[in-house]
Amino acid sequence: MRKAAIGVFVIDDQEIIRTAFARIFARDPRIRLVGTASGFEEAIGLVPKARPDVVVTEVLLPGFDGLELVRWLDRLAPRPMTIVVSAVGHPAMVLKAKKAGADAFVEKTVPVTDILETVIRTYQTGEFVWDELTSIDRVFPREDAERLRTLTPREREVLVGIGQGKINREIAEEFDLTEKTVKNYVSHLLQKLNMTCRAEAAALAGRLDFAEHPPVPPSDWDEEPDHALGDLVDH
């Protein structure tokens, strides 16, 4: 028996983008375009009726908070998977979109056919998709990019937390970890980044978010590296 095509809804303020998606999706029997919208308000009225399996959306929408749109989609019942296709692929934007409920993040610089394959892959596997190494190479100097490449996704999240001025307890609460686990993540990411203190990591993380370097909590400055890899597990 033939599997049903994946119902896809597209949200983008540019008509040419919506048209491009419609043409590409129409050529693939695995995809069924169920609707399009130019912004948040239009999407609110159309998406629940269309009941898509996947929503492909930009987050840079004039007059709208695209991340709030992602949060709204995440609360829908039945919940569609959300794939952000954005002109801005900065790591900080990707992390924010993922936290808001996005299931994948793709930059508009990639071919539309690649976006189609991301739709199918995300729907079939449920894995978060992002070519983060491409973005890291573009945003950071080569030396920083090479060091960031060594970090796991969780270590990158902890690094962002450091850059936001959060202490270990706050990072632990955000990701449902123990403080000891976070301390180990911090120690290992410092080793991988070839850094000797948390302040250096905070400075690097500040560049992740295009923000001023945030204050580093003094209570965490004097952490001694813990080399026990066995302790680096979520509880």
Image (spheres, grey):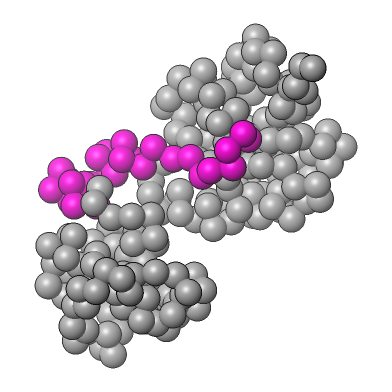
- The quarter of the picture where residue 219 lies is bottom left
Quadrant of the rendering where the N terminus is positioned = top right
Q: Does residue 200 lie above or below 50 as drawn? A: below
The reply to whether residue 190 is in sight is yes
Characterize the magenta stretch by its predominant secondary structure. helix
**Tally of numbered tags:** 0
- Residue drawn at 31 percent across, 78 percent down: 183
Q: Is residue 169 magenta?
A: no
In percent of width and height, residue 209 lies at 36, 58
Decide if residue 109 is on the left or right side of residue 138. Answer: right
- Residue drawn at 65 percent across, 9 percent down: 27
In percent of width and height, residue 178 lies at 44, 80
- Residue drawn at 58 percent across, 56 percent down: 100
- The quarter of the picture where residue 20 lies is top right
Residues rendered magenta in the picture: 123-148
The reply to whether residue 65 is in sight is no
In percent of width and height, residue 174 lies at 50, 73
- Residue drawn at 55 percent across, 31 percent down: 121
**Furthest-top residue in view?**
27
**Furthest-right residue in view?**
49
Q: Is residue 129 magenta?
A: yes
Q: Does residue 109 lie above or below 24 as drawn? A: below
